[in-house]
Amino acid sequence: MGTRSGDVDAGALTLIMEKEEIDYSSLNTLLNKHSGVLGISGISSDMREVESAAEEGEERAILALRMYDYRVKKYIGAYAAAMGGVDLLILLVESVKTHQKPGRIFVKTLNLWVSYLTGMRMLELMARSWLSARKSPR
């Protein structure tokens, strides 16, 4: 998500190549090095810099953060739906290599609160939540 485009309609790719008069190599660079959070924000792929710019009111940085949050929710929701629901969801900050502040994003999806926490505290909270849900009648 930092510099890569993510999901793109294949028809859009040929249109971009035609309108911008670029070849495959240039398109590849555009999609993999100049898109994502960097392309939307126009600032950086480092979420700390994007968050700082958003706090200062930079519209493109605010948009990049909103789009990032939306995509996180979209993928969690899609995977949960494909699996027929989830009992427990654990996300590790270290697996999201965008250098964002822990705790910045709180995503509510499918009656499930997900927060980015770090280390053992996250595991402890998630384990307690899971055990509590298993003990309560459905």
Image (cartoon, rainbow, N blue to C red):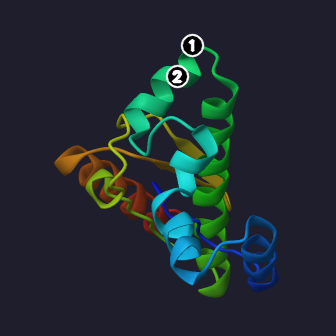
In this rendering, the answer to whether 14 lies above or below 51 is below
Q: From this viewpoint, which residue is outermost toward the left?
A: 120
Q: Residues within 10 Å of mark 2 (few under 14, many from 20)?
A: some
In this rendering, the answer to whether 17 lies above or below 123 is below
Image position, residue 131 (x, y; %):
37, 63
Q: Residue at x 47, y 57 (%)?
A: 3
Please state which amino acid type lies under the numbered disc 1.
Answer: Glu
Please state which amino acid type lies under the numbered disc 2.
Answer: Ala
Q: In this rendered view, identify the residue nearer to me: 56 or 75.
A: 56
Q: Which mark is residue 53?
A: 2
Check disc 2 and report its element: helix, strand or loop: helix
The number of callouts visible is 2
Q: Residue at x 67, y 52 (%)?
A: 70
**Would residue 86 be visible to someone looking at this image?**
no
Q: In this rendered view, identify the residue nearer to me: 85 or 31.
A: 31
Check disc 1 and report its element: helix, strand or loop: loop
Quarter of the picture containing the C terminus is: bottom right
Q: Which mark is residue 56?
A: 1
